Structures are given as structure tokens and as C-alpha cells.
Image (cartoon, rainbow, N blue to C red):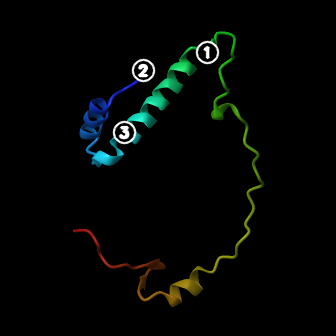
Amino acid sequence: MPINNDDVEKIAHLARLGISPDRLETYTKNLSGILELVEQMNEVDTSGVAPMAHPRDTKLRLRDDVVSEHNERDKFIKLAPASENGLFLVPKVLD
């Protein structure tokens, strides 16, 4: 499905893209090539091809849920510029 320069200008306008006139021919050639490739792929008979597996069908390897870091909350609370009841206080950013 070859396209012409007018088609590319219309597509660029709809996509709100600015294409310089000296690059228009290059874009037309590249888009035509992409559409030709899609047409070739549509012609391939895939009736005997099984669908690909979905990622959710895969079992994940899980690790043991063990503590790997020591609780240093008190140390970090002491370093914080402001805290209250063991929580960090931060400046209000939204009204």
C-alpha cells in the first residue's frame, strides 16, 4: 500500500508533527516501506501456529521471606530534620 506525499502531510498534521519539506520524501519512502512489510506479514498463513504463552502462565521462582536488613529506624529518625511519634515530618506540598 504505497502512500504519497499528501498522505504523509495529512498524517503529520493529524499527529501534530512538523515535517520539513526537504524530509517529506524520506518520510514517504519509510512509511511506504513499513506498510509494505505489514502487508507481507498479513499474507503469512498462521493457521497452524499455536498462540504464544501468556506471561501469567509462568510460575515465578520465589525466595524465602527472610529479614536481610537490620531495623535502624531510630538511628534515621534521629538524623531527620523533623519527626513526630516515630514518623518523618515533611513540608506540605499540596493544599
Query: Which of pointers 2 and 3 indicates the residue nearer the eye?
Result: 3
Residue at the outermost left position: 95
Give the residue at mark 1.
44
**Residue at the spot x=48%, y=31% of the render?**
34
Between 71 and 12, the residue placed more toward the observer is 12
**Residue at the spot x=26%, y=68% of the render?**
94
Element on which disc 3 rests: helix
Between 72 and 26, the residue placed more toward the observer is 26
Residue 11 position in % (x across, y down)? 29, 35
Q: Residue 24 lies in what quarter of the image?
A: top left
Element on which disc 1 rests: loop
Between 88 and 84, the residue placed more toward the observer is 88
**Residue at the spot x=64%, y=10% of the render?**
47
Residue 84 vertical position relative to residue 57 in the rendered view, above or below: below
Query: What is the distance, in whole Å, between disc 2 and disc 3 at their CAs?
Result: 16 Å
Q: Which mark is residue 53?
A: none
Residue 15 vertical position relative to residue 82 in the rendered view, above or below: above
Give the residue at mark 3.
25
Give the residue at mark 2.
1
Q: Do the residues labelled 3 and 1 touch (CB within 8 Å)?
A: no
Query: Which of pointers 2 and 1 indicates the residue nearer the eye?
Result: 2
